[in-house]
Image (cartoon, rainbow, N blue to C red):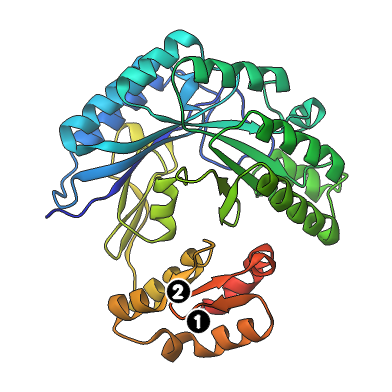
Amino acid sequence: MDKKRGVYIHVPFCIRKCRYCDFPSFEDREHIDSYFKALITEIRDEKETAGRITDTIYIGGGTPSCVPPLYISSVMEALSKTYVIEDDAEISMEMNPGTVDPGALKVYRSAGINRVSLGCQSFNDKSLRTLGRIHSSDDIRNTFEKLRDAGFDNINLDLISSLPGESGTDMERSLRKAAALSPEHISVYSLIIEEGTVFHELSMKNELKGLPDEEEQAETDLMVRTVLKDFGYSRYEISNYAKEGFECRHNIRYWKREDYRGFGLSAASLIGNRRFTNTRKMVYINQPGGSFEEDRTLSRKEEMEEFMFLGLRMTEGVSADDFLRYFGRDITEVYGGQLKEQMADGFLEYNGKRYFYNDRGLDVSNILLSAFLF
């Protein structure tokens, strides 16, 4: 039986580049038509036949909802001719409030999209302006209602915490407004100042004011967990919360190191122990799938490292039996010291089958996970 794989599609166009964003995306939209022709060519020219069955597809960006919706339909049609898409496949698409209309939503539904990730970031209009977003909090609510009216019953809302000039109280209000809409899934990511962004330039000039300190961030993390638990959401990964049965299957594939194939500019893939990433430059239009930022075979050591630092992002953690089956070595033989130390420090737990971080461990996991890199 063919091995299943996930599929990622990158749409690198935006109406306006946000001030915190380092993803490959462009405000210049004149290349939309030629880009999608290249994208479809890459999909149709997919040479590896093993794993041509998919049960998760994720269309991200950029802002996929800012391009004419028929381009999304054409991509889904190309995928259906290259892959066997299972009947119950999770097919996600990122959208931004204010960039969709009911007519477009009908096209997306007809194309097979059944899950939407809505880039809200905040329900605080002042914070939205700080971030450089093009929408308001009212736009979020209106877009959410349109999604429900169009029949979408699996919706994620993306939020960002630790924003410049935003208090913990502001963030809690924003979070409660998001949860009150009762989406199936909520992601809450702490702001990271990335190189190449407007925020990074401001930070280098000491002009990015009002960022929280570590203690304030810890208080916010606790608040997020508490509020979302009260609203019926379970934490299943560092930054992700879902109602029962609505965990993002595509993202879980990443954390479990299952095969996935990325198409489009900057799209990353993992097939077996091969990692490769398409070019981030628009040369992609002339060389779809033929120019790579990265293309390498992972060593056994690197695979073990990834098994640990990706798997431990999830609240279920990593399986000792899976480690033995994949690598032919006992997990304690390789990582016994790190596991013992982090358990003694009260961050890591073991239930006889799996090692997993508790909430204390997840909150400082960016530090703890580095211990599993040789």
Q: At 60% across and 52% down in the image, what residue appears?
A: 239
Name the N-terminal-most of marks 1 and 2: 2
**Displayed quadrant of residue 82:** top left
Badge 2 density bin: few <14, some 14–19, many ≥20, Cα 10 Å: some
Residue 305 is tagged as 2
Q: CA distance from mark 1 to mark 2?
A: 8 Å
SS at circle 1: loop
Residue 33 seen: no
Q: Is residue 336 above or below residue 13?
A: below
Q: Position of residue 328 (x, y in %)?
A: 29, 84
**153 to 102, vertically: above or below:** below
Depth check, front residue: 38 or 228: 228
Q: Quarter-wise, where is residue 282 in the image?
A: top left
Write the residue at 33% across / 86% down: 329
Query: Does residue 251 appear anywhere in the picture?
Result: yes
Cβ–Cβ under 8 Å for marks 1 and 2 = yes
| Residue type at the position of mark 2 | Glu
Nearer to us of marks 1 and 2 is 2
Q: Residue 160 falls in which quadrant of the image?
A: top right
**Between 311 and 64, the one nearer to me in the picture:** 311
Q: Nearer the viewer, residue 191 or 288?
A: 191
Side of 39 relative to 319 (left or right): left
Query: What residue sits 71% from the left and 29% below the top?
Result: 132
Could you say whether the residue bearing mark 2 is in a helix, strand or loop? Answer: helix
**Residue on which disc 1 sits:** 374
Left or right relative to 311: residue 284: left
Image coordinates of residue 162 in percent, x first then y, are 77, 47
Q: Position of residue 265 (x, y in %)?
A: 39, 39
| Amino acid beneath label 1 | Phe
Q: Is residue 58 above or below residue 351?
A: above
